Image (cartoon, coloured by chain):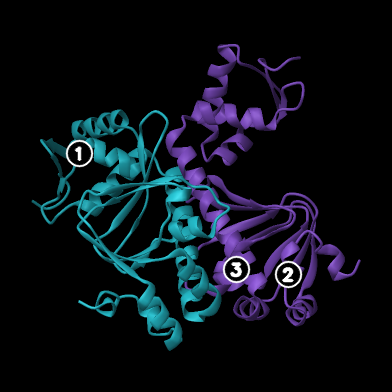
Chain colours: A cyan, B purple
Amino acid sequence: MDKKGYLKEFTFIEGMDPKNRNYLMDALIIKRLPKGFVMVGDQGNCKGIPLVTKGNLRLFKISENGREMTVYRVAEGELCVLAAVCVLGGLEYQYSVEAEKDCVIADIPPEAFIYLLEKDNSFKTYVFRTLADKLISSLNTMEMITFKSIEERIIDYLDTHADNQGKIVTTHEKIAIELGSSREVISRQLKKMADEGLLTQKRGSIILNKKPQ
Amino acid sequence: MDKKGYLKEFTFIEGMDPKNRNYLMDALIIKRLPKGFVMVGDQGNCKGIPLVTKGNLRLFKISENGREMTVYRVAEGELCVLAAVCVLGGLEYQYSVEAEKDCVIADIPPEAFIYLLEKDNSFKTYVFRTLADKLISSLNTMEMITFKSIEERIIDYLDTHADNQGKIVTTHEKIAIELGSSREVISRQLKKMADEGLLTQKRGSIILNKKPQ
């Protein structure tokens, strides 16, 4: 497939000045990351700003005591704006990246990114909007963590991930990472909820009892 | 004072194209907000993007069950970037604003903001940087809430706010709002920490015992 074929979900490209669009197309570097591929990000390591054309990336952090937290995901058709912030410099934020599925990435080299951010209004608007979007969604996550009890957040998580039969294929560890909690806390809450008859725990899955069987 | 006098902390103004700078100066509306003034923000209510030239603003949210959370502060010399996001539209985020001190605000009318964001590189870079900055700081807050125990966070809060004698003038309610917790949780933790000899609770203040008296 030519580069343009990969990028049809990125509608901002249509709106770009033709000269800038050609410049972007020439500059992009197409990469494939297999599912499970992990990169440890740091300031000096930001070699490009990825447009995810297939698959999805998960950004995460590991705490001093080894706990893991999902920072956010970059879905198909999205730009990883933290890489953009990292390239623009002056701001320190360390994180790691995992390919959750087989991914095809179109990397924008830093110098091309900086050039287009100055010269092209459609590009600039897109980046600005993505940045604003991530700010709002991180404030919403903060609010959820602050205002909701761990039990409410587990119920939200299970509701979102359940299939038609109310089955969720997951582990206590995975729920802990998604909710920014510890495995011990999640296991204790799930046991309590199972005792109350809200759910049934199986090996590798959970069945929500309130859903129609 | 003329408008320029108020704005000397906003160094991006120096870097603006002189024509754009004059346009900004003409468009700015200077407002005074007394300490304690509260605005309830919503989409339709964003009449301008404030540059805080004196004092500081606190953005906060109230949950359905009446709990309050500080989203972030806009300090002297800063732009309220959530107002900018709100004006650019398409993103819903409801919050309230409180003047924590007597404030002088230079409001940028929405149409001037949009015009300058397109036309002026120094202005654009400043807004972009502020947005990136707030994204990073909200991710850091999220991480702190996720990775640190409430006891560690209370200790951080007390250490930051203590005077030379280890005294912090505050209330349990206020600590709860700052840490996104409930008054009950904070009171229970403070009692535990007092029982362990880490601090002494007084009416309206807390004394950290480990600080030199």
Three-letter amino acid code at disc 2?
A: Gly
- Which of these two is toward me, B149 or A9? A9
Which residue is denoted by mark 1 in the rendering? A171
- Residue A43's place in the image compared with B157, above or below, is below
Farthest bottom residue in view:
A18
| Percent x, y of residue B157 | 61, 32
Which residue is denoted by mark 2 in the rendering? B15
SS under mark 1: loop
Three-letter amino acid code at disc 3?
A: Ala
Q: Where's the C terminus of chain B, which quadrant?
A: top right
SS under mark 3: helix
Identified at 76% across, 81% down, the residue is B23
Label 2 lies in what chain? B
- The reply to whether callout 3 and callout 1 are in contact (CB within 8 Å) is no
Q: Where's the N terminus of chain B, which quadrant?
A: bottom right
Q: Distance between the residues labelled 3 and 1?
A: 41 Å
SS under mark 2: loop
**In-image side of A33 versus A204 (left or right):** right
| Percent x, y of residue A167 | 13, 48
Identified at 61% across, 75% down, the residue is B117
Rendering quarter of residue A193: top left
- Residue A212's place in the image compared with B201, above or below, is below
**In-image side of A74 versus B65 (left or right):** left
Q: Is residue A95 visible?
A: yes
Label 3 lies in what chain? B
Which residue is denoted by mark 3 in the rendering? B84
